[in-house]
Amino acid sequence: MSPNILGWQLPSLPKSRGKRVLVFAGFVLVLVVLSRCAFRGAPTAAATSEEIRVLIAAPENSIRIRAQDLRCPRIGDLGLVHAIEVRTQAKGLLVIPLREERQSDAMSEPAFVLDDGNVDITWLGPATWTTGAASNANSSRQHFGRLTVHAADDGSLRCVLHAPLELYVTGVIAAEMGTSFPPAALAAQAIAARGFALTARARRKDSQDFDVFDDERDQVYRGVDAAPSLIEAVRATTDLVLAYDGTLLRSYYASTCGGRTRDGYAFFRDVPREPFRGVVCEACSDSPLYRWSRKIERGAFTQLGCGRSGSLSFELFADDDRGDLEKVRITGPHGAVIAPASSLSRLRPLPSRWIDSIRDRGDDVEVRGRGFGHGVGLCQYGARGYARAGWSCTAILQHYFPGASITHLRDL
Ligand SMILES: [Zn+2]
């Protein structure tokens, strides 16, 4: 493992796997203890006590949580329970402590009814859970922190995980980039994901009971991932974010820019211009979606007001210098229609809005384009390419966010 993935001199991890596991265990323990101290209101100076509130998508009307030392402070000492099931019911919540993993409802401990529909669940170490969807594929993923469960008005459960920030970041890197990218790319992703989460938290803190969605509405989190490459990326960048002009930067990122990142201000409007001006990217050409083509059935274009017969021609209108499609004029025997780019994507989802050409091929219309995702900020495949070429994490981030600097949270 490179000792300088940031481009700075950093102490490296021990090489042996056994030592790595110990380092990870210590890393987790420190974060969990700090997180718990923060929960209890104890003063904490260390920035690693940062917590992020993650809204867990689609728990439906029940969740079963398994962990060591499970506790529900509101309903007293639960003893040696191995799992807790929480369900909605007509009056609030039903909390069922389970002493055996396979225990049936009939054999369960007395259940507790919480009429106000709110409960906090804590545990020590990792927890796993399954939700109302019994086939939940993520039941083996581990979570740290505590969970607040609330019965929503529509009868569903609303679950918010209060997770230690740095452990949450390992999960985001795993879901958004994977474990196999080079260390400098993973470190860049860690810094981007951390900053993105913290700007989301700042936006919602006065209006919502959560900071981030656990899916593409913010960034994907499916549980902590303890892969050594991810732990190293987070350890090497703990508490580091991107800042511009002394302010935390909303560090957008996307899979593949296609050769040039998009002007972020033109797309999101909520970012400063300089660090989000589009830049040339010469490192993402080995992404599977660097260039792409998609076929849309000719008949589908009747949904846009085109006639069913005759050949169509397409004139593209871009909304920025890069060539991202704003709208298209479609001309056929029955006249011309103007369709916004979003309506084209509704006929068939397209990897990006950077469209080179649209051509009528008879039975199909072929769309050719570049890149995958919105193209703003860090290009993930580009980060991989530059890291393979020897760039440091710092060099990668300074390329994609011109003028921004890597900053410790305590300095903001
Ligand atoms: Zn790129």
Image: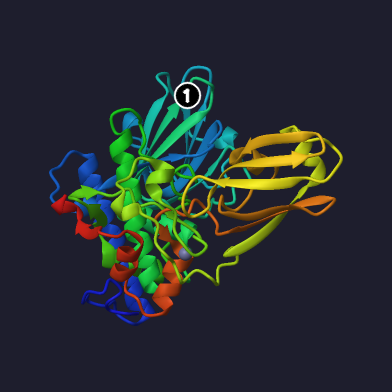
The residue at the point 45 percent across, 50 percent down is: 221
Is residue 165 visible in the rendered structure shown here? no
Q: Is residue 409 left or right of residue 293?
A: left
In the image, is residue 328 above or below residue 230?
Answer: above
Q: Is residue 196 left or right of residue 239?
A: right
Going by the picture, which residue comes out furthest to the right?
A: 309
Q: Pick the residue in front: 130 or 314.
A: 314
Where does residue 309 sit, x and y in percent of width and height? Answer: 87, 40
Q: Secondary structure at mark 1?
A: loop
In the image, is residue 283 above or below residue 241?
Answer: below
Task: Choose top left, top right, bottom left or bottom right for residue 37.
Answer: top left
Q: Pick the residue in front: 194 or 67.
A: 194
Where does residue 209 sit, x and y in percent of width and height? Answer: 35, 31
Number of numbered discs overlaid on the protein picture? 1
Q: Is residue 181 left or right of residue 14?
A: right
Where does residue 98 sit, x and y in percent of width and height? Answer: 49, 40
Q: Quadrant of the N terminus?
A: bottom left
Q: Is residue 282 left or right of residue 290?
A: left
Where does residue 242 sit, x and y in percent of width and height? Answer: 27, 56
Q: Pick the residue in front: 253 or 31.
A: 253
The amino acid type, in three-letter code, at marker 1 is Ala
The residue at the point 44 percent across, 54 percent down is: 262
Q: Residues within 10 Å of mark 1 (few under 14, many from 20)?
A: some
